[in-house]
Amino acid sequence: MSDSLPVLMGIQGALTAVSGGFNALYFAGYSSPHPARRVATLVLALVNLSFLLQGLYWVLPIGGSSSYFLKSGPLLGVGLVTLMASLAITALILRQRLNGRHKG
């Protein structure tokens, strides 16, 4: 398992980066006439930008720091929580978009 840990963390990081990037772009392009929704959309865009950056951190060797973190199994669990949150948001966006297309 210890040999596959870096691979699993790389896959997790890549999926988190792709999902977070998709979500951030979606929320960046979302517009609403309601001020509260605009603020909420900005917050969601920033949260998903952080998902993107965290995913890239796990994938890209930045200053050699990634190799230290890849040796820690519990951090895989922490990253999985971020991945699950990002994928859940992606699923909600896709569901909304697909349902919107079927109505029109």
Image: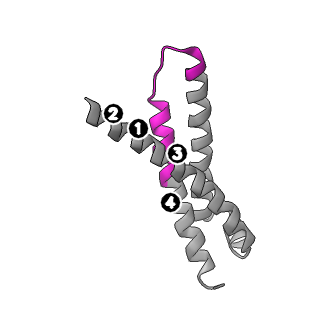
Asked whether, in this view, residue 39 is left or right of residue 96, the answer is right
Few, some or many residues within 10 Å of mark 4 (<14, 14–19, 20+): many
Q: Is residue 16 above or below residue 27?
A: below
Q: Which residue is mark 3?
A: 89
Q: Position of residue 4 (x, y in %)?
A: 59, 82
Of the residues tagged 2 and 3, which is closer to the observer? 2
Q: Which residue is mark 1?
A: 96
Marking on residue 100: 2
Q: Secondary structure at mark 1?
A: helix
Residue beneath the point at 25% across and 29% down:
104
Specify which label sits upstream in the sequence, 3 or 1. 3
Q: Position of residue 22 (x, y in %)?
A: 45, 45
Quarter of the image for residue 45 reads top right
Residue beneath the point at 68% across and 72% down:
70
Q: Amino acid at mark 1?
A: Gln
Q: Which residue is mark 4?
A: 15
Q: CA distance from mark 1 to mark 4?
A: 21 Å
Residues at badges 4 and 2 in contact (C-beta under 8 Å)? no
In the rendered image, residue 32 lying in the magenta stretch gets the answer yes
Specify which label sits upstream in the sequence, 1 or 4. 4
